[in-house]
Amino acid sequence: MRSWTSNHPEALSLVPKELRSDATSDVYLPPSSDVGVLGVKWNPRLDCLGFRAVPQIPTGTLTKRILLSNVMKVYDPLGLLMPVVIWGRIIIQRLWRAGIGWDTDLPEMYVSESKDWFAQLRIAADIKIPRWYMVRSDLSDVQLHLIADGGEQAYACVAYWRFTYSDDSVSTALVGSKARVSPLKPISIPRSELQAALIASRFAQTILQAHRFEPSATTFWTDSTTVLKWIRSDARAFKPFVAHRLGEILETTNPSDWRWIPTSLNVADDATKPKRTDFTASHRWFTGPQFLVEPTSAWPTERHINEEETSPDPELKSNLLILLLDIPLPYSVPDPTRFNSWLRLLRATARVLQGARLFRLKLSRPIHPNSKLYIDHTTSPHQVHAADIIEAEKMLVRQAQRESFPEELTNLRSSKPVPKDSRIKKLAPILDEEGLMRQDTRIISAPGVNNETKSPMILDGRHYISRLIIFHEHVKASHQFNELVLNELRQRFSIPRARGTIRSVASSCLKCKRWNTKPMQPQIDAPEAITPFHFILGSSSVVPWTTSLTDADLSRRCDWRRTLRLADHFWARWLREYLPTLRQRGPNNNNLLNLGEGDVVLIADPTLPRGLWPLGRVAKVYLGPDGAVRVADVHTKGGVLRRPARKLILMEAATQPVTTSG
């Protein structure tokens, strides 16, 4: 590596002469020994930054091409000469707007202004700026201050360090600046001021990342009360142009970091309204506003503005009146035909409900004026609650019922019976409190049975949603065991001709088409109801051994305990799989088979072990207002017991069906 240089002679003496820079070949640096560093000039002996010489003021014809060439020759990466540099860019933009050609002689007004710019540039080329910020090393506090301003021609920001030393003395140092010419399409002054505030917030992050020391405070100054009001308000209340920029500003700054400064003290104003001035090293651009070296008590304070005297803000969104109507729409859920999975459709609908809930929550909660975009910390947007899943299922079933049974729903809402030719007349449909159509079953009062099983939701097997549900159960059953699918569906749904629909869904399953095995066929013509004792002992009435058992007994060598525990499993399956088939109720009470005297019944008693329910004969029956038997006296070997009819299971009828009047 060659061309070494240093501002310290002792350090430079350690480098061989042939490896030093040509400008610093002598250890004792002359005052005029400038070295080119990153496009600017550096005087190692004075430790100051300078700028390259600029061409002389053109004496001949001046065109846009010649002017642009000279503007592009000015290299100022830190923005130390921004009031001069931005002036040249503004002149070029004005020529562009005027439609002047590249090689056309400039009008006199532009020639005069261009010569003023050249003269200002010649003066700025002689400026020397200390490379080292601080004048002393006994620092006690460091602050960063950024001043922003926007105008019709440009918007800019300039940054300064404020150093406080151990003796409470204060010095300032120019860090740099950023500026942009205003866009060709004119924007309002408040928007230009907001653009200046935006580049100030960005520039502050660049400065903080590029320096090793961290300031105790970062303060932003603007003379626009409108921008200050915007920053202290909710960004969502404004139109997109303002809202987006406020959102970015508030991501890296706090509203309390922003302060007001009078226009007369706004140093950034020198870059937005350039003019010919005495731009030397003593200019306020290089030292910052005078109040920065004064105590904080002497800093500018914001003047009070009467809100009633100000005109309406044109950047605010128009006030909209939002009416939330609870109207059952025909397409209130996602289109089911776009889904091939019941779970995906269910979760998508739950997401819609979750979004609606969060939207209502935000409408009902006030947002603090100084807060950022509101985030509900009590609810994660990535989680779907169980309540949303349950409500989504009800919405989808409700949608399927509206499309499959519109006439039946209309009649039930009007307290009328369903049509006589309805496919679900035998299911005795009723409407629950949520508007869902359910089956009114005979086991509605059965104890220990889930409410969904007692009164299942009615679905049409031909509807797409129904087929998605059936296919979901089909997959859960490992693409086989249609009876298992039927039993699972019966726990919550009542589907007419469900077996045929299940076979249809299974036959259309692509995975099932690769199987050469014949599915098991149910035996539906059995001479009597299958109970757990048929599988174990071949009889439906026997008193087995009773003892306390657990699943651990299944793996022990005591075969009799294993047999009894299996009986418990069969009993649970009988209650779950066979009992739902007994729930169908007729559409009315006509021709209802009531209990009669002499009937042999089994008395259901959940407190007794299985197989010990007493058997007896009906001695007397008591009718209800509807003519149906509600209570009966049963003669057993232990005496006469009075039990409700729902606790009596008819084993053998002794009389003909009793016809009752509804």
Image: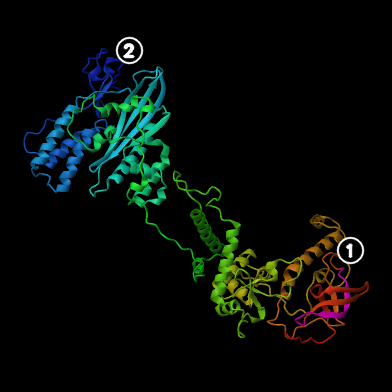
Q: Residues within 10 Å of mark 2 (few under 14, many from 20)?
A: few
As drawn, is 6 to the left or to the right of 68? Answer: right
- Left or right, 188 with respect to 648, comes to left
Residue hosting label 1:
545
Foreground pick, 640 / 560: 640
Where is residue 653, by image quadrant? bottom right
| Residue 424 x, y percent position in the rendering | 63, 79
User: Where the C terminus falls, by quadrant?
Assistant: bottom right
Give x and y (percent) for residue 644: 82, 74
Q: Is residue 146 above or below residue 572?
A: above
Toward which corner of the image does residue 216 lie, by quadrant? top left
Vertically, is 429 above or below 90? below
Read off the residue under disc 2: 10
Secondary structure of the residue carrying numbered label 2 = helix
The amino acid type of the residue labelled 1 equals Trp
Q: Which residues are magenta?
A: 612-627
Going from the N terminus, do you reach mark 2 or mark 1 first? 2
The extreme left residue here reads 60
**Front position in the image: 39 or 259:** 259
Q: Is residue 267 above or below residue 228?
A: above
Magenta-colored stretch includes residue 264: no
Mark yes or no: residue 511 visible.
no
Residue 402 visible? The answer is yes
**Coloring applied to the structure:** rainbow
Q: Is residue 613 magenta?
A: yes
Q: Amino acid at mark 2?
A: Glu
Q: Where's residue 127, x and y in %?
A: 22, 25
Tell me how far mark 2 sits from mark 1, CA to CA: 106 Å
Q: In screen coordinates, is 199 left or right of 508? A: left
Occupied quadrant, residue 43: top left
Give the residue drawn at x 89%, y 73%.
641
